[in-house]
Structures are given as C-alpha cells and as structure tokens.
Amino acid sequence: MKRDRKNKRNMIEDAPGRTLFFFALPMILGNLFQQFYNMADSAIVGRFIGEDALAAVGASYALTTVFVMIAIGGGNGSSIITSQYLGAKKYRKMKTSIFTALITFLLVSVVLALFGLGFSGGILRILKTPVNILDQAGIYLKIYFCGLPFLFMYNVLAAMFNATGDSGTPLYLLIFSSVLNVALDILFVTQFALGVAGVAIATVLAQGISAVISFCLLLAKLKGYGEEQESLPEEQEISDTGGGRLFDVSMLGRMIKVAVPTMLQQSIVSVGMLLVQSVVNGFGSSVLAGYTAGSRIDSICIVPMIATGNAVSTFTAQNMGAGRPERVRQGYRAARFMVYGFAVFICVILLLFRYQIIGIFMNGEANTQAYSTGVSYLSFIAFFFVWIGLKATADGVLRGSGDVAVFTAANLVNLAIRVAVANLCAPYWGVAAVWYAVPMGWAANFFISFGRYLSGKWSQKKLIH
C-alpha cells in the first residue's frame, strides 16, 4: 500500500503541475499505443492488401471508434466517483463503485455488440459506403463487434487504475497489447492471407487477452485496500474485508450522471466522423482512403490533449473529494501550459513530415488522389490542435467536479457545428469542408466550457456522500 499512499499524496498534496505531467505521461503513451492498433491495421492493410481494403477499414473506423470512445468515456466518467471516494479516503465505497461500473458496462457492451451484429450492414449502407468495399467493411465490423465486451472491459478497467492514481499499469498492458496486435496482424494478413478479417481477429484477440490480465491485476490491487479502515459509524461497518457490496443502485445513478456526458465528450470526434462519413464516402473510395490515412494521424495527434484533459479530470475529482478546490485551479493553469507545448510540437512535426507520414499508408505515385487528400488534411489541421487541448482541459475540470450540464451543452454544440458545416459546405468547398468544420467545433466547445470554469460554480458541486 505504500505506492498507493504515495499516489494519493501526489494528487492531493504535491505540486499540481509536476503531478499532472507525470500522471498524464503514462496515459498519453498508453493512448498512443491504443491508437497504434488502428494505425497498424490501416498500414498493413494498405500495404499488403490494397486501396480498397484500406478504404473498407476506413469506412468501418468511424463506426468502431464511436464504440471505443463510448467505452473510454464510460470508464472515465464512472471513475470520477471512484476518484472522489479515494480522495475522501472512503475505500469501501471506492471498491463498490469500481465493481458497479464493471458490471454495468459488461451488460451494456453485450447489448451494443448484439446491436452491432444485427445492424452494421444497414448502417454502412445508410452511410453510403461505396459498393466495391461494402462486403469487406461488413466482415470487419461483424468480427469487431464479437469482441466488443473485451474492448469495454479493458477500457473501464484502465480508467479504474487511473482513478486510483496508477497510470502506469494501463500503459504496460497497452504496450503488450499493441505489440501482440501488430504481430497477429502481420501473421494473419501475410501468412494466412485472411485479408481484412485477419486484422479484425488480431484486434479482438489482443484486446481480449489484455482485458483478462487487467481484471486479475485490479483484483490484486484492491485487496490492499482491505487493510485500510474507514472512519464510519458502527452501523455502517461491513465485516467483509473485501469492502462492501458489489453493486449499488444509488451509486450507479450518480455514475450515470457523469458517465453519459463524459461518453459524449470522449466520443464527440468519433460521432462527428460517423455523421459526416456519408459526405466523405460521396467523393469515392480514393478520397476515402486518403481521408482514412489522415484521420488515423489526427487520432494520434489528439492523444496528448485528451489524456491531459483526463488527467485534469482525475486530479479535480480527487481534490474535490478532499475538499481542496483551490488546487484544482492551480492544476488547470498548469495543464494549459502543457497543451501549448504539445500543440507547437505536433504542428512542427506534421508540417515537416506530412508527406512521409501519409506515405506510410500508401504509395504516392500509385494512389495520387488518395495521397494528395491525406497530405492536404494534415497540412490544414496541423495548426489547430491547441483548440482541442484547451477544450479538453476545461472539460476535465467540469467533469471531475461533476458539473455536467454546461459541459454537455458545449460538446453538443461542438458536434452540431461539425455536422452542419460539413454537410452544408461540402457542395461548395469539396471534401475539405469536413476538416474545416473540426477546429470550429473545438473552439466553440472551449469558449463555452471555459466560461463555466470562470464562473466558479463547478467548485460548489458535490457527488459523493
């Protein structure tokens, strides 16, 4: 328990800037490895199978990423309750919150998997997926949905490790999963010639193994908290050293209050991609392939921004649980400087190496239109990642404190702008309208959330009892 106590002191007592940076760093690396799953799928498919296969994975990507972000958002939202109980040193309730979240999201993932298996083909047709890639995209999705419970369980488990101040364990597991995923991709595609189905099977297997290992490690970690004692009235004491109930309905209600807006916030990029997918698809499979390559890089570039926001959320939750909102303000200011540094670094790298980066996915001479589409996307979006970083950190304070109303509205405005601009302006600006809409949505989201932060009303919220 010494390490856990140190983590708690770091969040509640140590210098906010240093604490946030070293807590966020493993989260950033871990999320980069998670995006590496998708990048590896696309690079291997594009290089070893062909442009149509890359476009098929890309057509599936918008839909599958929505489910990934629902899982991440659900885990992060539920973990706010866990973090606040940890900050308040109510360890039994903390454990109950963890098991309540795991049971809930296991059931949710099964329902969503069944939905996906039943309706994925229809969704692809609604999105105007090009006919020449429809069958391959459908195969990829069906296999992917079979493994959806593993995806949900891993991401919820990772969020619970982060909630307890342990951002290292999820990183190590993601490194393991990523290496395994890439190895299986290469084996199934180049040796067994399984095509698009092979990369889907590889992803499901890697996530499944990671989920099982994560669950075992979390159980071992929670046993240590059985040694801690809460200062509870005698009538509330629970004799089981495991620490209370496995499921609490009232606690679930408080989790849902934060988890649903968090799922929206985490999935806003992916939902936006899904809702504008038909716009991109309308320009043909070559443009779709280029956009797919560019969006893979986009997903990697936003990782440090989203991870910093999630770190702010955990930092806020623990300090609100400990009754120290003044530290939240200090942490938020430090997080903004982190965002500025990340934004400058990302912009420079993309502008210097955009041609080589898109070249990872395709041959520029063989796929001229696809190649130029990907390069154009990166050349534009490189300048605007600061906005998603600023939005993510402001959102993190509101989410961590449980102030969800304005937070939800800000993310809905973000989504509405992306969808409206892409659909209304595509006839005039071409496919570029899809990415012009992105920074508009991010900036609007930030200004709304930042205004709420300045009001200070978030510091008056109370989630736990």
Image: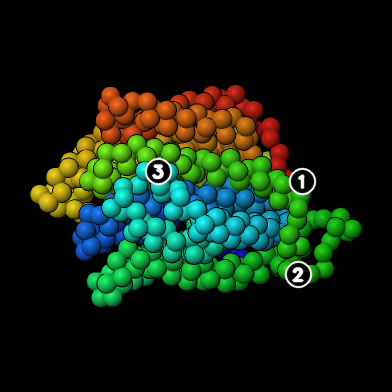
Badge 3 density bin: few <14, some 14–19, many ≥20, Cα 10 Å = some
Q: Which mark is residue 465?
A: 1
Query: In the visual, does 60 lie left or right of 291?
Result: right
**What amino acid does circle 3 point to?**
Leu
**What amino acid does circle 2 point to?**
Thr
Q: Tag 1 or tag 3, which sits nearer the N-term?
A: 3
Q: Position of residue 101 (x, y in %)?
A: 64, 56
- Rounded to the nearest whole Å, what is the CA distance between mark 2 and mark 1? 21 Å
Q: Quadrant of the N terminus?
A: bottom right
Q: Nearer the viewer, mark 3 or mark 1?
A: 3
Front residue of this view, candidates 416 and 355: 416
Which quarter of the picture shows residue 376?
top left
Look at mark 3 in the image and give the residue it sits on.
127
Q: Residue at x 52, y 49 (%)?
A: 70
**Above or below, 464 relative to 436:** below
- Rounded to the nearest whole Å, what is the CA distance between mark 3 and mark 2? 52 Å
Q: Position of residue 26 (x, y in %)?
A: 43, 56
Q: Position of residue 31 (x, y in %)?
A: 41, 54
Q: Which mark is residue 241?
A: 2
